[in-house]
Image (cartoon, rainbow, N blue to C red):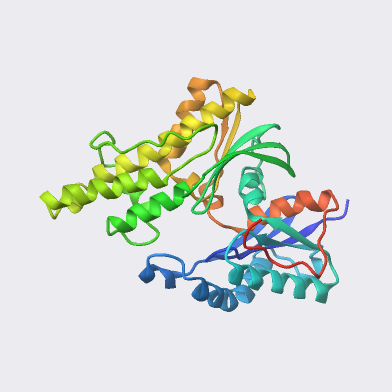
Amino acid sequence: MNDTIILAIESSCDDTSAAIIRNGIVLSNVIAGQKVHEEYGGVVPELASRSHQENIVPVIDLAIKNANISKKDISAIGFTRGPGLLGSLLIGTSFAKGFALSLNIPLIEVNHLQAHVLASFIEELGETIEKPNFPFLCLLVSGGHTQIIVVRDYLEMEIIGQTIDDAAGEAFDKSAKVLGLPYPGGPIIDKEAAKGNASAFTLAKPQIANLDFSFSGLKTSFLYLLRDKSKVNPNFAQENISDLCATLQKSIVDILIEKLVKASIQTGIKEIVIGGGVSANSGLRNAIVETGTKQGWKTYLPKLKYTTDNAAMIGITAHYKHLNGDYSNQSVSPLARF
């Protein structure tokens, strides 16, 4: 069998990433982050797209070198078409189209969210991992999305629950901003929560029908708690930072787990996967494993380095689309929303 080598490109937000996948195995995965957004407390789209322009050539060059291949060995190019920031997506899409045209090889467009779902299938050179069995449920949790997805095959997925307002990652980051923590706040909340008492305070819990989520009310409840307590003690947030983070994290994780349990019971599916940036949160990872033991689930947690935006997950999705003969043409354009 001839080797199929895919160059994968990810540029949906503020990370420029490139990976080389050979026959479904990751040979290299390079990520360039963007520190420029920290002083603004969030991603600035214009600055993100400029940084992608600066990073994309050296990142791809390094991915090819690290994989010890030549660009002439590349069989196809997978790229993130969306969803994401349009300016950022344009950089990755335009480069992918130009490079594919110059090498006369096919293009494979990838849905960024679908790639997060398949992150648990990423295998590196020299390793064998236990992969989820179909059908499985995926709890996809990131800064922009919170969804429960029934995954029937690599490319056949159905969303059965999603947020009706803010995403879980957004609730983490915006609450961190209110606490005065630097961006991105989610990992800092996770670290502080480990030192705190999760029962120290009570936050409002949303009552949303079916398998959908809502985090705007929880966020407002957290804001009001800070506001009211700070009137009495201006140093309240600083003096109770660990307890506040622990309370917030447990509240978000409880909401996620409760809906996932409900989805498992409704569908009868006990193969459970998590994906997306928030799947790096230690509170969520521990809760999934503990709940899985009680519920009789088989749980799969992606490696931490594959939870955030990366090209390896784009590559593994492109690999399965390639096996299916699912290609794009040169008229393809990025989509901020699918």
Regarding residue 216, the answer to whether it shows in the image is yes
Indicate left or right for 302 with 284 as reference.
right
Q: Position of residue 142 (x, y in %)?
A: 51, 50
Indicate left or right for 286 with 94 as reference.
left
Q: Is residue 274 or residue 27 the one in the foreground? A: 274
Indicate left or right for 82 with 328 as reference.
left
Quarter-of-image position of residue 283: top left
Q: Position of residue 314 (x, y in %)?
A: 67, 56
* Up-down relation of residue 251 to residue 292 (above or below): below
Q: Which residue is farthest left? A: 232
Residue at 36 percent of width and 43 percent of height: 218
Exactly how many numbered labels are in the figure? 0
* Up-down relation of residue 76 to residue 284 (above or below): below
Q: Position of residue 26 (x, y in %)?
A: 67, 54
Q: Position of residue 29 (x, y in %)?
A: 61, 60
Indicate left or right for 78 with 245 as reference.
right
Residue at 83 percent of width and 66 percent of height: 329
Residue at 30 percent of width and 41 percent of height: 246
Regarding residue 286, the answer to whether it shows in the image is no
Please state, as top left, top right, bottom left or bottom right, where the C terminus lies in the image.
bottom right
Q: Is residue 37 or residue 228 the one in the foreground? A: 228
Q: Which residue is farthest right? A: 1
* Up-down relation of residue 113 to residue 53 (above or below): above
